[in-house]
Image (spheres, rainbow, N blue to C red):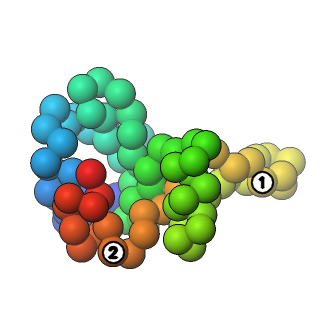
Amino acid sequence: MSVSDADIAFALELFAPLGGLSHRKMMGGLTIYHDGQVFSLISGDGTIFLKAKGAFANDLAAQGARQFSSVNKDGKTHSMGYWTMPDAALDDPDLAC
């Protein structure tokens, strides 16, 4: 599955208050950059993930966020430093940013 144009438009509008956005399609998903730095991924199904570690990742987890993970060729799950956004942030650009 490939990320849809509607999902891309939604995410770019959600993060528009940040300014300095660019994006690039990759492996069915999308990478979003702020001033040249990756801060968000969108999976092929349209799920938005934020790059997070430390206290920010802990806060997202406490709010019920799930961590992005993939399964390698040996069947082992590999977690990455990206987390889903809290539901409230999906409806509020200020909170999302």
| Residue at 42 percent of width and 63 percent of height | 85
Tag 1 residue: 77
Identify which residue, 58 or 74, lies in the foreground.
Answer: 58
**Disc 1 crowd, CA 10 A, few/some/many (<14, 14-19, 20+):** few
Q: Amino acid at mark 2?
A: Ala
Instruction: Kindly indicate the quadrant of the structure image that contains residue 59.
Output: bottom right
Q: Is residue 44 left or right of residue 79?
A: left
| Residue at 44 percent of width and 50 percent of height | 50
**Where is residue 35 shown, x and y percent of the image?**
24, 26
Question: Element under label 1?
Answer: strand
**Where is residue 86 shown, x and y percent of the image?**
42, 69
**Where is residue 28 shown, x and y percent of the image?**
42, 51
Residue 87, above or below 45: below
Tag 2 residue: 88
* Residue 70 appears in the rendering: yes
* Residue 82 appears in the rendering: no
